[in-house]
Amino acid sequence: MLAFHSTRIVHILFIIGVFVPTSMILADDISLPASKDNTIFSEGDLSNGSGDHLFSGTNGIGNFRRALLKFDVAASVPVGATIDSVQLSLNVSKVPDAFPQNFSLFLLTSDWGESSSNAPDEEGTGTDAATDDASWIHTFFPFKFWTTAGGDIVANASATALIGGLGSVIWPSTDAMIADVQQWLDQPDSNFGWLLIGDETAAGTARRFDSRENPQASQTPRLQITFTPIPPTGACCSRSGDCSDVQASVCRLSGGFFKSAGSSCALIQECPLFADSFEN
């Protein structure tokens, strides 16, 4: 009789582990700084890899500026997570006027460099590209080139924001932005970031944004990500006494008994047989 009750106690304790989970899988948020950024200028091999600012749009005589931004998603978001929403925030620190202009994010399909170039004064003219800087022609100056001058990108924008005056601007989450960031998590080698392109149909549309090197840390580029981690695995005992390490939902669908998140079959001496737990 004593042995019978001891077996029942083991069963009850194991079942408690099944129906009172030790943790719940909830969405999480993280704010990432840019891992690299730069500006390319249509006048030629100019760059601003180490400057305090980024530029996008056209200057007063119609020359183009485009900003490059990358965020190292895979270094901060757990493998297997699902990206639920993302938003990009930049700080606008100089404008030619307050007339609103569209600025769009395009997924980059080629890698590019951020090196030691640092433009003088207010930085809007750029400076000579340093070795391994991106420029209008080069992905990594002076030996590697864009397939298309001005940046290799997908055809459709991932998001667009209307920017008027100074201050913080946000590109709210879109399905395309979520897909971009999910790809960067699942396939880190494909993460080349976004190219920010302003209105290039008229002169004088450029905005100056603060870069990751800007001394005002609160004004540097940030990518806000909401994600749901992949559910953890744990020991799952079948009614026959077999054990496998699976997710709780998989275990329960198979009719098994889930010990707890983080448990392991390797640490369980044996699975109890549950047949007698359901005897009348």
Image (tube, grey):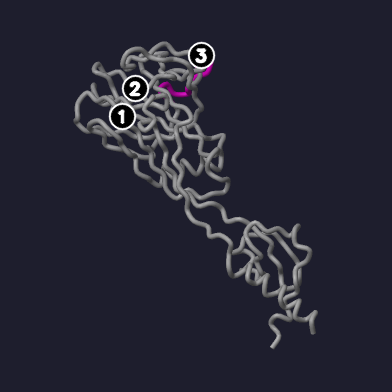
Where disc 1 sits, the SS reads: loop
Residue 174 within the magenta-colored segment of the rendering: no
Q: Which residue is mark 2?
A: 65
Crowding at label 2, few (<14), some or many (≥20) Cα neighbours within 10 Å? many
Give the residue furthest to the bottom: 280
Q: Earlier in the sequence, mark 2 or mark 3?
A: 2
Q: Which residues are magenta?
A: 141-151
Q: Residue at x 40, y 36 (%)?
A: 222
- Secondary structure, mark 3, is loop
Q: Earlier in the sequence, mark 2 or mark 1?
A: 2
- For image coordinates 35% across by 12% down, the residue present is 120
List the residue tagged with mark 1: 198
Q: How many marks?
A: 3
Separation (CA) of disc 2 from disc 1: 8 Å
Identify residue for label 3.
131
Q: Nearer the viewer, residue 149 or 63?
A: 63
Report the residue at 42% width, 27% height from top: 212
Which is more toward the observer, 93 or 96?
Answer: 93
